[in-house]
Every structure is written in structure tokens, then in C-alpha cells.
Image (cartoon, grey):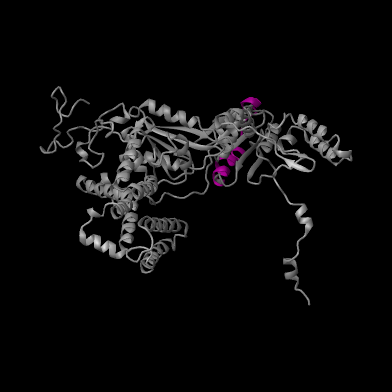
């Protein structure tokens, strides 16, 4: 019988492949990466030869192993490397240490590793050939193909040697050609000057770029090139010029995707760092608006900007924000969501302690109150600190609408918050422990609907909650064309099929659906995630202790919130502790009577508007008076 070739290949194993498999794990008797770098590879080779020796009874093997250990600079089993004795691989005993002791012991290792990624603080070389060789060494040329080096000569008469370096894709080619190369190569006719002054001549009369920055050290040069600038080196000068030529592809300013409003601005942040700061300045045109720049990351630097209004924001708050940013020591920081976890007060807390938004008008308003805004490169979300719990339930539309409508929308959202948090637990506690609180007709209806259900109430709720969370997560991951359809159809099919199969009761489907709708009404996404987690905690408390468990858990959460802070500000301020504030905490007050900035921010300027903003209307004049009797208080 002939076996087909394709079937024979499926049933055949090549032993040579098994012997040549690649592995990153250190094998016994082979030097690791640290041994190879320290020149101890020969120790591993000597050890291997010793193990292959024909000494009877393994004589000399243990001595050679000890010599190899001494050659690696390790004593005993402190490093935890496997040892081979009598053909058996044994792992030495390693004493466990605490996390704090481990960090202290390995701090010098981290510093030595990060120094390898950083560039030395040496100056730029006057010799052009040395500078060219250094650039090739730093950017791993010629392997690195997106680094462009263009050598040329400056001037039509003097012919100074020079070259430019830029990254293809991060710079605008037209700007590089027309604003850098063309003026230097074709439009310059200069007399011969000293080599040390050539770069000054180029900077003063040859480069028409609006942003040209001298760089005297290699870290500044590398940082500028990686940011999209073009670096210019001239023979005989110890200074390079960084010409602003950024021009990579980016998403244009579009509509908000998360914080949509019916009435209000329709612009949202993008991944372009400078566009985000410019959007805020377009809303808040003030010369007192200050933007300070930072670099975070050792391996790959990320731009971070701190924005505040000088004269309003408390300097202590600004200094604390800058201190936390400067203390971040990571290789790479890709997004504001990861950056938020480094600077918040308590990362283990479920509720957010940093406010994130995609709306520039929201950031502009928070800056006028005394907050500090933080922008992270390549992130379409800006951060604002500090944040209080009540701000997480506000939306920009509350201010753009008249205050009765804004207050009505806030009441809807507060009810939705309580429903999303407590309704499933309330249903479980009511049906299991407190049926006497249900009207007789409703109790009989609930009992009739659950007559054929084989599971207890808590199992029904958990199954339905899991199904809803699964549909929600799948709707996000599914492509946007079919995502909403799959979510709606999946929820309808699962709910209807579960009721007809007798797995859940119809009333429970209504409860879970109402809870899901209420969770979508929470305006802040991070707060919504915290509520989804807390809902399960309240559900378990209700399943064990009924209303008593829910009441106890509610006070535990409230006590935890009352002691939690965000950049030194209590999370429940100005309610707990009680502080003076305008009527913009739980409900929305009239715009013409909200005269003071939040007291918990300790701003330098307490008043933000004239108390008598409507002098033509007697009913809207301010009635609050200071102790001296003057209307509107002291500003």
C-alpha cells in the first residue's frame, strides 16, 4: 500500500530538529549573557570539558564545578544557578527576601543596565568625520534604514563641508529641502571665516527656519533628531543646529468619541502632542497660561507637558506635579493611561484619582479653576489634577445648557449611578432575606416567574452579569461595522433564550438590562469601570447578609472615599470636609451666581467673576454679604 507523501510527512519527526531548537534559558554548564559580557565564557567551556572527562567515579568534577563558580564571581548558591552532579540537575537553595530588600539589592543592577541605554554627556566633535562616525554608531548604521544622512558643502565659493541627519517619516521632506538644504547649498555666497564661527554664520544669515536651536552635547542632538528635527553639522564647529522640520502623518482634529454633547464644542484631542496644547490655547487665550515641557523615559523618551495658569494655580500643587513626573524612571511611557498609574496617590484604589478627558474646552475650564493639566505625547486624552468625586459626574453640557436643565441631567445621572451600583444587590437581598417588603401581588408574580428556574437568585444574577459583561467587551473588540449590531442582537437572543429555557426569570432580565443602561449613563469611563467592579462586591454582600451587608459595605466604601486624596485634596471635597464653594457640586447652579473658585484648590485668586454680573435684574443680584456688610463679599 502506497502512503501519500503529505501523510508520510505528517507522521514523521526529524530528530535533528529537536537537537537544534533555540532557547533563551541558560543551560547547565553554559555561560549566561552576563558571563559572556564579563569575559567568563571560558569558564563554562572548561567546566564542560571537565564534565566530559574520563575521571573514574567523577573525580575532579566537583572541584572543576567549584572553580567555575569562583570564576563567575558567585559564592555557593546565592545566584540560584542550576548545578549538575552525578548526571542530575539540582537547583541550589535560595533564601527568600522581601520586595524591599530585593529592590535594594538590585538597585545597582538597574542603574548599570540603564546607563547602557543612555548617551554620555560628551560634547559634539569639531571634526566632521568623528561626528559622522558617532552618528552612525548611535543610530546603528548601516543596519538602521530610516536614518537619512546627507553630506554636502555649504556655499558656492567657500565650500564648507557639512551633513544633515533626520529620520525619514518624522520630518517634512519639503521643509528639509527648501528651508535647510537649498539655502545652504545654492543660495549662500559667504567669505571664509574661522572654523569655530562657521556655525554662527549659518545660524545668523543662512537658515530661514523659524525654530533653530543650538545643541552642544550628543544627548540634545539625539533627542532632537528623534523628535523630528533635522540636525546640521558643520566642519570645524563643536555645535550642531536642530532645525524644526516635524511633519509626520497624524490624525486630524475630529469629533469626541467618548464625551459627546448635543450643545457645545465638537473638537477633541488627537495623538499629536503640539496640536493638543494648541487646542487648549485656542480656547483659553491668556498670556498667563504656562506650559512646561518634560521628557520621560530612558530607552524611548516621551514628551510630557504641564500646563497651568500662573497667578491662579497654587505653586505647591504645580511643584508636586513636577516632582512626581521627574521621579518616574521607566524605559518607555506610551500613553496617558499608563502615566496616570505612576503619579496617582493610591494605585490600588478602584475609583480614579486623576481626571482624564478628550475635550480641550473641559481642560480650559479646569485650568481657570486652578487645576493643573498634563499632556502626554501620542495620547488623545489629557489629564487634570487634582480631581474630586463630584467632578467625575459632571459633563460640559451641564454648563452650556440653562441651569434647570443641567440640574435635571445631573439628577438623572446620580440616580443612574445608584441603580448601576445597587440594583442587582437590592434584588437579591429583597427576594432572599426581605420578601415582606415586597407588595403581595408583586411577590406572587416574582414567585411565579421563578417557579421553573432551577438556580438560586445569586446564580441567576451572576450568570446574567457575566453575559452582559461579555457582550460589552465583545462589542468593543468586534470591528465597528458590526459591533453595535452584534451587541444588540446578542443581548436579545441570550435574554430571550434564557427566559424560554427556564434558566432565569423575566424580572431578572429587566433588572440586569436596567442596570446596564444605568452604567452607560455614567459620564466618566474610569468611574464606570469602578462602579462595575463595586457592583459585584455589593452583590456578594447582599447574597450573604441581605440589606445589612449592603448597608455595611456602603459605609465601608464611603469611609474609604472620605480618607482618600488626590494630590493632597480629599476626594469628597467640598462636601467632606465641608468647604465653601459655588453651587456646582451635586446640582448645577446659575452661572451668574457662581462667583468663587473651588476652595479646596487653594487658588491665588478666589473670585473668578464680578458678583454683580446682571445689574439690570433685581432678582439676580447677589444677596450674600461679607461681615463688613458690603454686597458680594471681598474680592
In magenta, the rendered stretch is 173-197
Q: Is residue 231 above or below residue 174?
A: above
Majority secondary structure in the magenta region: helix
Q: Position of residue 420 (x, y in %)?
A: 32, 51
Give the side of residue 292 with respect to residue 23, left or right: left
Decide if residue 488 is on the left or right side of residue 115.
Answer: left
Quick one: quadrant of the C terminus? top left
**Between 210 and 593, the one nearer to me in the picture:** 593
Decide if residue 289 is in sight here: no
Image quadrant holding the N terminus, namely bottom right
Percent position of residue 162, x then y: 65, 35
Which of the pair 510/177 is nearer the observer? 510
Q: Is residue 360 left or right of residue 170?
A: left
Q: Nearer the viewer, residue 536 or 112?
A: 536
- Residue at the outermost top position: 628
- Residue 178 on the magenta segment: yes
Q: Nearer the viewer, residue 73 or 456?
A: 456
Was residue 15 drawn as part of the magenta stretch in this picture?
A: no
Residue 138 visible in rendering: yes
Amino acid at each position: 500500500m502506497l502512503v501519500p507523501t503529505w501523510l508520510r510527512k505528517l507522521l514523521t519527526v526529524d530528530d535533528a530538529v529537536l537537537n537544534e531548537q533555540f532557547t533563551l534559558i541558560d543551560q547547565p554548564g553554559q555561560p549566561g549573557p552576563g558571563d559572556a559580557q564579563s569575559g567568563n565564557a571560558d569558564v563554562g567551556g572548561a567546566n564542560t570539558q571537565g564534565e566530559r572527562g574520563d575521571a573514574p567515579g567523577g573525580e575532579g568534577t566537583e572541584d572543576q564545578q567549584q572553580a567555575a563558580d569562583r570564576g563567575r564571581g558567585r559564592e555557593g548558591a546565592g545566584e540560584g544557578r542550576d548545578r549538575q552532579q552525578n548526571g542530575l540537575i539540582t537547583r541550589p537553595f535560595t533564601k527568600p527576601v522581601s520586595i524591599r530588600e530585593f529592590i535594594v539589592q538590585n538597585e545597582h543592577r538597574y542603574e548599570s543596565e540603564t546607563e547602557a541605554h543612555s548617551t554620555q554627556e560628551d560634547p559634539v566633535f569639531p571634526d566632521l568625520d568623528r561626528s559622522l562616525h558617532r552618528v552612525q554608531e548611535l543610530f546603528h548604521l548601516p543596519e538602521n534604514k530610516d536614518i537619512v544622512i546627507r553630506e554636502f558643502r555649504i556655499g558656492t565659493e567657500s565650500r564648507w563641508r557639512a551633513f544633515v541627519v533626520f529620520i525619514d517619516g518624522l520630518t517634512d521632506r519639503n521643509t528639509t529641502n527648501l528651508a535647510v538644504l537649498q539655502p545652504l547649498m545654492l543660495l549662500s555666497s559667504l567669505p571664509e571665516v574661522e572654523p569655530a564661527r562657521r556655525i554662527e554664520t549659518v545660524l545668523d544669515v543662512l537658515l530661514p527656519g523659524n525654530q533653530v536651536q543650538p545643541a552642544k552635547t550628543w544627548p540634545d542632538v539625539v533627542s532632537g533628531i528623534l523628535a523630528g528635527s533635522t540636525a546640521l553639522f558643520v566642519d570645524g564647529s563643536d555645535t550642531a543646529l536642530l532645525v524644526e522640520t516635524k511633519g509626520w502623518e497624524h490624525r486630524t482634529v475630529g469629533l469626541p468619541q467618548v464625551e459627546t454633547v448635543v450643545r457645545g464644542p465638537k473638537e477633541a484631542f488627537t495623538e499629536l502632542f503640539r496640536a493638543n496644547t494648541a487646542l487648549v490655547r485656542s480656547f483659553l487665550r491668556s498670556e498667563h497660561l504656562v506650559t512646561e515641557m518634560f521628557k520621560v523615559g530612558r530607552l524611548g523618551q516621551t514628551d510630557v507637558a504641564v500646563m497651568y495658569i500662573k497667578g491662579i494655580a497654587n505653586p505647591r500643587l504645580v511643584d508636586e506635579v513636577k516632582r512626581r513626573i521627574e521621579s518616574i524612571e521607566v524605559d518607555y511611557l506610551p500613553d496617558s493611561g499608563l502615566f496616570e498609574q505612576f503619579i496617582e496617590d493610591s494605585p490600588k484604589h478602584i475609583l480614579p484619582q486623576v481626571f482624564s478627558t478628550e475635550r480641550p474646552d473641559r481642560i480650559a475650564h479646569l485650568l481657570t479653576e486652578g487645576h493643573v493639566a498634563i499632556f502626554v505625547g501620542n495620547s488623545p486624552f489629557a489629564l487634570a489634577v487634582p480631581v474630586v468625586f463630584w467632578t467625575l459626574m459632571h459633563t460640559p453640557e451641564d454648563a452650556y445648557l440653562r441651569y434647570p436643565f443641567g440640574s435635571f441631567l445631573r439628577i438623572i445621572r446620580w440616580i443612574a449611578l445608584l441603580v448601576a451600583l445597587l440594583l442587582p444587590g437590592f434584588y437579591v437581598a429583597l427576594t432572599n432575606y426581605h420578601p415582606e417588603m415586597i407588595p403581595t401581588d408583586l411577590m406572587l408574580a416574582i414567585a411565579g416567574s421563578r417557579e421553573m428556574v432551577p438556580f438560586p437568585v445569586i446564580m441567576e444574577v451572576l450568570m446574567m452579569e457575566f453575559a452582559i459583561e461579555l457582550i460589552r467587551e465583545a462589542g468593543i473588540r468586534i470591528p465597528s461595522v458590526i459591533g453595535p449590531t452584534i451587541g444588540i442582537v446578542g443581548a436579545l437572543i441570550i435574554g430571550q433564550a434564557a427566559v424560554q429555557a427556564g434558566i432565569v426569570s423575566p424580572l431578572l432580565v429587566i433588572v440586569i438590562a436596567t442596570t446596564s443602561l444605568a452604567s452607560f449613563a455614567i459620564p466618566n469611563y474610569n468611574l464606570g469601570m469602578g462602579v462595575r467592579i463595586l457592583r459585584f462586591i455589593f452583590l456578594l454582600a447582599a447574597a450573604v447578609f441581605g440589606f445589612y451587608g449592603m448597608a455595611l459595605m456602603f459605609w465601608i466604601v464611603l469611609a474609604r472615599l472620605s480618607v482618600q486624596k488626590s494630590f493632597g485634596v480629599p476626594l469628597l471635597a467640598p462636601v467632606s470636609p465641608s468647604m465653601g464653594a459655588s453651587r456646582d457640586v451635586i446640582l448645577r447652579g446659575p452661572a451668574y451666581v457662581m462667583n468663587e473658585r473651588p476652595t479646596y484648590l487653594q487658588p491665588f485668586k478666589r473670585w473668578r467673576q464680578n458678583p454683580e454680573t446682571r445689574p439690570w435684574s433685581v432678582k439676580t443680584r447677589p444677596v450674600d454679604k461679607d461681615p463688613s456688610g458690603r454686597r458680594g463679599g471681598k474680592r
